[in-house]
Image (tube, rainbow, N blue to C red):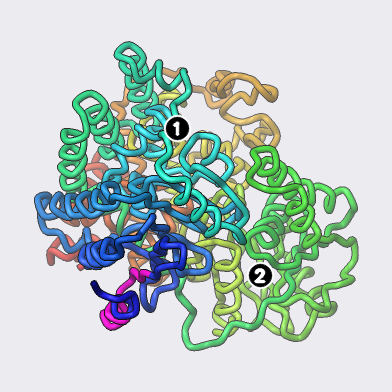
Amino acid sequence: MMSFENALHEQCAKASAFHLTLRPDNIGVITIDVPGEKVNTLKAEFVEQVNDVLIKAQQFPALEGLVILSGKPDSFIAGADITMIAACKSAKEAEALAKKGQSTLAQIAAFPVPVIAAIHGACLGGGLELALACHGRVCSLDDKTALGLPEVQLGLLPGSGGTQRLPRLIGARHALDMILTGKQIRARQALRMGLVDDAVPQSILLQAAIERVKQGWKSRRELPWQERLLNGPLGKSLLFKIVRKKTLEKTHGNYPAAERIIQVVRTGLDQGNASGYEAEARAFGELAMTPQSAALRSLFFASTALKKERWGDAQPHSLQRIGVLGGGLMGGGIACVTATRGGLPVRIKDVNEQGINHALKYTWDLLGKRVRSKRMRPVERQKQMMLISGTTDYSGFERVDIVVEAVFEDIALKQQMVADIEQHAAPHTVFASNTSSLPISQIAAKAARPQQVIGLHYFSPVDKMPLVEVIPHAATSEATIATTVALAQQQGKTAIVVADRAGFYVNRILAPYINEAARCLLQGEPIESLDKALVDFGFPVGPIMLLDEVGIDVGTKIIPILTAELGERFAAPAAFDAVLKDGRKGRKNGRGFYLYPAKGGKRKLVDSSIYALLGVTAKAHIPQAEIAQRCVMLMLNEAARCLDEGVIRCARDGDIGAVFGIGFPPFLGGPFRYMDELGAEKVVNTLRQLQQQYGEHFAPCERLQRMAEQGERFYP
């Protein structure tokens, strides 16, 4: 028999990610610690390592059980390494990859003594599938602990048994909800639904797992009677019918993974394990080859790269304290993400106490939702609230490293803010303006230190929208850019650096899209029809509802700036002036294109009086596909211009900006990946047809024409 010391030595010699130690009480502990990585991810080459460590464990005849835990400080297993999928050239190769994962985890499930997963931190994707293959699971109560199967967000399904083990453990209803949404479950919720057997403080996690091993084989938790009812023939039929209907309402048929998940889970429940695993592997292979999965994976890689990216060679300044000017919706949101996600002290200045209280309430209300759902303890909420303070003067601003200005869109006011900060803050303080329309060079025009003035454009609502645009002007220093990008990343944002041109990037590509929807409306197309066409195409909301959400007044401020700098193609239909003159600003004042019912009211309905205001009679007459084509093609054309003019650095940034900033359909990968999918020649031909039918604003830009002639792509 091989001694423990020899086994351990051999493991180390191979630099394995799986390390076995045997305790004096004959319980083995397998520690997962991928060499050279911050978090554990499962790789194809680990199949042999898992095999080896399980074989070695069985060589100890007195072995009573195993505990699997992570050697990383704040993560169990963050998922599988998805670069493995990119290496697959066919559905068969991807299917084989899934089968290999299934086979490996089946060894854990069939292990002759109890195997318990001790989970602390992220336990996602393949990590949760590994934990599900264990005979029991214990997790820590730490805020960092989260369990989920997010594969659907990459256009895939769990391919190592997750679609089969999870429904049998927690019931089809909860399992489908988890797999179809990719949501992450916290410790207490996981315990309530039976996903884990115990949830304990991190300090006793290993001991709790060992105790569970010592208890030996325990009878499997019985599902509640409601879940057992749903597992019966009638209940199951009703459940899957409802789930399929709700899923289609959300995906509009644009995400094939969702439908395959439902099919595969049903197959396993109806036909048994063998058929279920076979269906899972086959579906995984086929989905891996879909353009939707390729697009979603490209976004994942792009956003991951951007989150890690540092600006140039300049070193960002140390960030200790942040200032925010303005306690309105944007200022309150910026303060919230700075404190709650960035962990940085924030000092808010507003002209009155009411503004400060409004900003504080923003964070209090958001954290309150977490407290009520048991995802945060009241003491933790209090701790985070203590990071935010307010003032009606500039006291405390002498110690801040960056001031984010979120006051009204008025150039004189913003220039005054720059002067005030230069007077009251430290010499190194960066001034970042959250303007959505004003040139940063103008905001910095009277600055004593223009190299420390920059744009930092957030999107509303700040706590939900993942994107920020970082906008240097000609005199902004590299250190200021680096520091601003570092702040955005610490706030949990994805930052793209864009040029100081009218509309920057996101609003510039959004304006033609909304203007074309407005032209369709003035042709008599009903608002519901317009919005439905673009939602069916894949946007989260339609263009008219989006205008209500953003603010009709905000849109009307941006359009003249775009028209003045970039030409008449940005001019909004003149008839739309009547909307703003009627006092309609959208959701913010409860008057827009839609009616806004009192709290708890039904879904939003169109305000039919808008048609008389615009002098049109509403009647659906434009085909839905044509509406979507007209609006989207203008967005694509403008995105190509932005790349050609250097407004964005690369196609990757343009795709991230459109998807994360305005909800361009993720399954298309962004404007540039979508144009590559269509082909430049088809894009140009479509634009020319629309140009002949609807006007010169559809003229294809020179970049696209050149690419069509030369057969070029935006991505290699």
Name which quarter of the figure residue 372 lies in.
top right
Amino acid type at circle 1 is Arg
Q: Which of 198 and 66 is in front in this view?
A: 66
Q: Quadrant of the N terminus?
A: bottom left
Tag 2 residue: 432
Tag 1 residue: 221
Name which quarter of the figure residue 10 lies in.
bottom left
Q: In x, y percent, where is residue 314?
A: 53, 87
Q: Report the label total.
A: 2
**Mark whose residue sits in front, 2 or 1:** 1
Residue 668 visible, this angle: no
Is the residue marked by circle 1 packed among few (<14), some (14-19), or many (20+) residues within 10 Å?
few
Q: In x, y percent, where is residue 634?
A: 35, 48
Q: Give the range drawn in magenta.
A: 9-20
Q: Which residue is drawn at 48% across and 23% down?
A: 224
Q: Residue at x 32, y 40 (%)?
A: 630
Horizontal relation, residue 26 to residue 371: left or right: left
Q: In which quarter of the image is the C terminus?
A: bottom left
Q: Residue 469 carries which label?
A: none
Residue 627 drawn above or below residue 302? above
Amino acid type at circle 2 is Ala
Q: Which of 100 and 674 is in front in this view?
A: 100
Q: In x, y percent, where is residue 11?
A: 29, 76
